[in-house]
């Protein structure tokens, strides 16, 4: 297609095709099998056509791509997807995400997309309000919690070393005072990965013991801090761990870490959202006094991928760490240039979808969504846990719970229960009724029940409980 042939209808047919396919997916996902129904070989065969020489009609490209993807798209946009921690997309957020692509702004600097810059400014302000974070904190909209950790921990590294007279921006880490990271055994894998990327290495991390509620033990932290009281230290705490949604005791741990001048970072990938719930926000008491926080939009706020948020109390240090100046860029004096806050240069205008999600729900709608997900997680765990052959390991405190399944043989061993649990999870997924993922928790295999979709309701819970009951009955025969 030549540039001259672009006319009003160039976008019409492919976009109409996309709208038609999208609506079809979003409507049928409610009742369709949740897990994949196509095999790897099938998907490869369908997509892997020879690289074409001549171009293909745009609408046909869309139609054929959708056709090839059949059975290879999981039902994460529905109400019965409970694997990992994966949210759906709110209608306004999805539509805003389409507009983001239609506008295709480079949201790195204000000059290239003023509206994208201002919408992020406002989204950041709203997020801090919803999450109970200091109004003056710096923030960045990034790809996910992984890069939010990188952003926050880069600032921590910068500031801790600056306090010791070391300029990491200029001199790097060779010869710098060695930073250590204290966290709990329940830390998410994205924290060590961020340390790897930041040149600090996973080896600087010490995983401390937790109590029976999976919370970092205060004595363990105090002892570790006391061992090397002068060493530059980052303490990584959790607001909602992956298995049971545990919250560290911030009211005790944050002041303790501060006594040793440590930087406190909180991983709240999904858990930080309980700040929106009057019933649950007590779990975050004291968290507002940390130095940095991360969370996701694409998990519990139900914004499309990719959407993660980094917040840093010391906005000046945040900016000093990330700021990028180049002669050819028109830097804004008054407006927000996102490259001053994010690790990216050219980037998607991700503020629009977040802005739209918050607008669609409002404060009370976010609260209602958080509380409903928790209620549905509890109903799933309690009701499946009451079925013959099921065993509840952890009742949800928020939206995460754990179940396991007991091998029907009399006197079955723990290893047999473990293997049986994995077989039940696979059978549930194969049945199409729901998607759950497994985990190893305290040495035992378990099925995670994780509810983050705005669409999950009582009818879904009913269908899933009946479906799991059927799977368990069939397996006993
Ligand atoms: C999902 C998750 C992360 C990583 O977030 P991404 O958005 O996938 O990068 C980090 N920590 C916890 C506790 C998580 O659940």
Image (spheres, grey):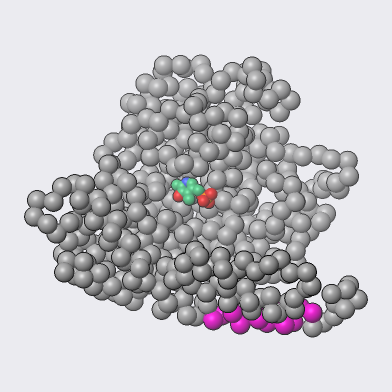
Residue 426 visible here: yes
Rendered position, 182 above or below 362 = above
Q: Position of residue 344 (x, y in %)?
A: 70, 46
Viewer-proximal residue, 389 or 276?
A: 389
Hey, which residue is sitting farthest right in the picture?
Answer: 4
Residue at 52% over, 77% down: 25
Tell me if 119 is positioned left or right of 133 in this view. right
Tell me if 219 is positioned left or right of 115 in this view. left
Tell me if 172 is positioned left or right of 456 in this view. right
Hey, which residue is sitting farthest left in the picture?
Answer: 410
Residue at 36% over, 66% down: 429
Q: Position of residue 338 (x, y in %)?
A: 72, 48
Q: Main secondary structure of the magenta part?
A: helix
- Total marks drawn? 0
Q: Which residues are magenta?
A: 10-24
Residue at 69% over, 75% down: 61
- Is 82 magenta? The answer is no
Q: Position of residue 227 (x, y in %)?
A: 41, 16
- Quadrant the N terminus occupies: bottom right
Q: Position of residue 10 (x, y in %)?
A: 79, 79
Residue 399 visible here: no
Viewer-proximal residue, 361 or 64?
A: 64
Rendered position, 331 above or below 26 = above
Tell me if 203 is positioned left or right of 64 in this view. left
Q: Quadrant of residue 200?
A: top right
- Quadrant the C terminus occupies: bottom left
Residue at 75% over, 76% down: 56
């Amino acid at each position: 297609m030549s540039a001259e042939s672009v006319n009003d209808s160039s976008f019409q047919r492919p976009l109409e095709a996309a709208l038609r396919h999208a609506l079809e997916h979003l409507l049928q996902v409610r009742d369709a099998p949740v897990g994949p129904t196509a095999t790897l070989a099938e998907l490869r065969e369908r997509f892997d056509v020879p690289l074409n020489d001549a171009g293909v009609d745009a609408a046909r490209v869309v139609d054929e791509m959708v056709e090839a993807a059949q059975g290879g798209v999981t039902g994460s946009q529905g109400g019965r997807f409970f694997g990992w921690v994966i949210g759906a997309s709110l209608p306004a957020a999805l539509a805003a995400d389409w507009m983001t692509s239609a506008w295709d702004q480079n949201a790195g600097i204000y000059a290239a997309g003023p509206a994208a810059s201002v919408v992020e400014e406002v989204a950041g302000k709203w997020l801090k309000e919803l999450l109970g974070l200091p109004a003056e904190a710096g923030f960045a909209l990034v790809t996910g919690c992984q890069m939010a950790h990188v952003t926050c921990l880069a600032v921590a590294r910068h500031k801790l070393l600056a306090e010791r007279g070391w300029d990491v921006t200029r001199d790097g880490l060779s010869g710098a005072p060695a930073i250590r990271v204290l966290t709990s055994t329940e830390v998410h894998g994205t924290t060590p990965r961020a340390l790897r990327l930041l040149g600090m290495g996973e080896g600087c991390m010490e995983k401390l013991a937790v109590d029976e509620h999976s919370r970092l033990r205060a004595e363990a932290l105090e002892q570790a801090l006391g061992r090397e009281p002068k060493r530059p230290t980052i303490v990584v705490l959790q607001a909602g761990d992956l298995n049971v949604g545990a919250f560290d005791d911030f009211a005790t741990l944050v002041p303790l870490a501060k006594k040793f001048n440590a930087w406190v970072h909180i991983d709240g990938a999904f858990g930080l959202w309980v700040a929106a719930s009057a019933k649950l926000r007590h779990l975050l008491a004291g968290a507002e006094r940390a130095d940095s926080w991360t969370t996701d939009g694409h998990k519990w706020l139900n914004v499309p991928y990719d959407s993660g948020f980094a917040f840093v109390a010391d906005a000046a240090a945040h900016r000093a760490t990330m700021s990028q100046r180049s002669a050819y860029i028109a830097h804004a004096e008054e407006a927000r240039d996102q490259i001053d806050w994010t690790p990216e240069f050219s980037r998607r205008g991700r503020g629009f979808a977040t802005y739209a999600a918050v607008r669609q729900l409002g404060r009370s709608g976010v609260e209602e969504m958080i509380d409903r997900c928790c209620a549905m997680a509890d109903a799933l765990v309690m009701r499946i846990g009451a079925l013959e052959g099921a065993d509840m390991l952890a009742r949800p405190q928020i939206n995460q719970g754990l179940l396991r399944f007991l091998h029907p043989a009399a006197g079955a061993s723990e290893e047999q229960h473990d293997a049986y649990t994995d077989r039940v999870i696979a059978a549930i997924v194969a049945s199409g009724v729901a998607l759950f993922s497994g985990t190893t928790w305290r040495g035992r295999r378990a099925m995670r029940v994780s509810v983050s979709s705005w669409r999950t309701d009582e009818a879904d819970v009913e269908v899933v409980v009946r479906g799991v009951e059927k799977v368990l009955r069939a397996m006993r025969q």
